[in-house]
Amino acid sequence: MKYLKLFILISLALSIAACGTAPTTPVATTLPPVVADDVIVTEGRLEPIHYAELALNASGLVSEVLISEGDTVSAGDVIARLEAGQAQTLESAQAKAAQDLTTAYQSVRDAQFKLDNFDVPYDFASMTPSQAVEATLEKLNTARANFEPYKNISDRSLELTDAEKRGDEVIIGTAKVYKKRLDDAWADYRKAILWLELESNLEKAQSILVQAQRDYDSLMDPTFSEGTAGARAALANAEVRATFSGVVTNLDLKVGEFAASGKPVVTIADTSSWIIKTTDLTEIDVVNISEGQTAIVTLDAIPELELNGNVLTVGQNYSENQGDVVYEVTILLTEKDPAMRWGMTAEIKFEK
């Protein structure tokens, strides 16, 4: 029994010694690969697809305000009217434009009649009025230079004795020839100037007619299109009218208060569609953005709502933001929600 215990102890000692000297094998570990992010994320702000700030083209007291903030207006709707001595309503501007157009037509007819009845000299037959002026001026300068040595020979200096006349015949004769040429050159030059003036008067009358017709058409435009809104606002300057259909988002006019020309007083927004504008895309990111590219937009105020959109424009000019070169990108949303409001912040995701 004694020997059996000793044997067991020796066996255990050998086993422990063997384990202590056995080489260790390293365990292999596998790291996951690093995957590049294929999504560009930035921030932007919500804006209506179209908006305009309207200013007055005359100063005066506000006599009427016909619209309130939040109201929907159509193109041509009167928003407010002014009391101003020199200002015109649309109706008075239309009447004046009609009279101006009639006067302009008459001026063109008169100018054309005078030009048609001008007797163009034979020497000018192959020239335009400006060419005739240039050619006759050149001849006039030559005639003046030729007559210069003889300009002090007056009529009294030609009253010489017979002996003196015989001695100065050549000089006197030459002076008369050059004087006649100078007088003829002046006459031709005046005719060319008159011809050019008549043509210029016709061109000026035609230009006035074109503008008068444009003003008349703008004031009479039944659709109140944006293309004619500028002229209409300048001519009918006693009124502020909507230039397109939309919602009045700001109105800084009150009856009885003085309103100054040139100061924006009304903002109209077309909220039929919305856009997101971002100016946070750096030069590194913007090269991965192109027009038509899809984007996903989430508004901070409505985080549960994801809106789809497409890149509408990529800015060609840059600005600087905290040392970074950044570009403006506009996204046109293809969806909308009644809770959307101008100015809301948004997160935009672009897929590279």
Image (cartoon, rainbow, N blue to C red):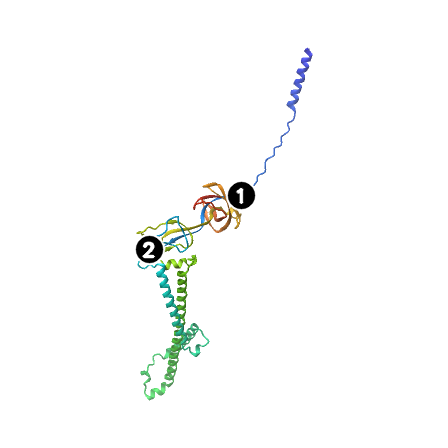
Say which quarter of the image contains residue 107. bottom left
Q: Secondary structure at mark 1?
A: strand
Crowding around mark 1 (Cα neighbors within 10 Å: few <14, some 14 to 19, many 20+) is few
Q: Nearer the viewer, mark 1 or mark 2?
A: 2
Above-or-below relation of 4 to 75: above
Q: Return the x and y of residue 266 as percentages of the image width and height.
A: 38, 51
Query: Can the viewer see residue 59 in this picture?
Result: no
Q: Which residue is label 1 attached to?
A: 39
* Quadrant of the drawing holding the N terminus: top right
Residue at position x 69%, y 13% in the image: 4
Q: Which residue is label 2 attached to?
A: 82
Q: Return the x and y of residue 76 as percentages of the image width and height.
A: 40, 56
Q: Return the x and y of residue 105 as percentages of the image width and height.
A: 39, 69
Crowding around mark 2 (Cα neighbors within 10 Å: few <14, some 14 to 19, many 20+) is many
Query: Can the viewer see residue 149 in this picture?
Result: yes
Say which quarter of the image contains residue 229. bottom left
Q: Return the x and y of residue 14 as percentages of the image width and height.
A: 67, 19
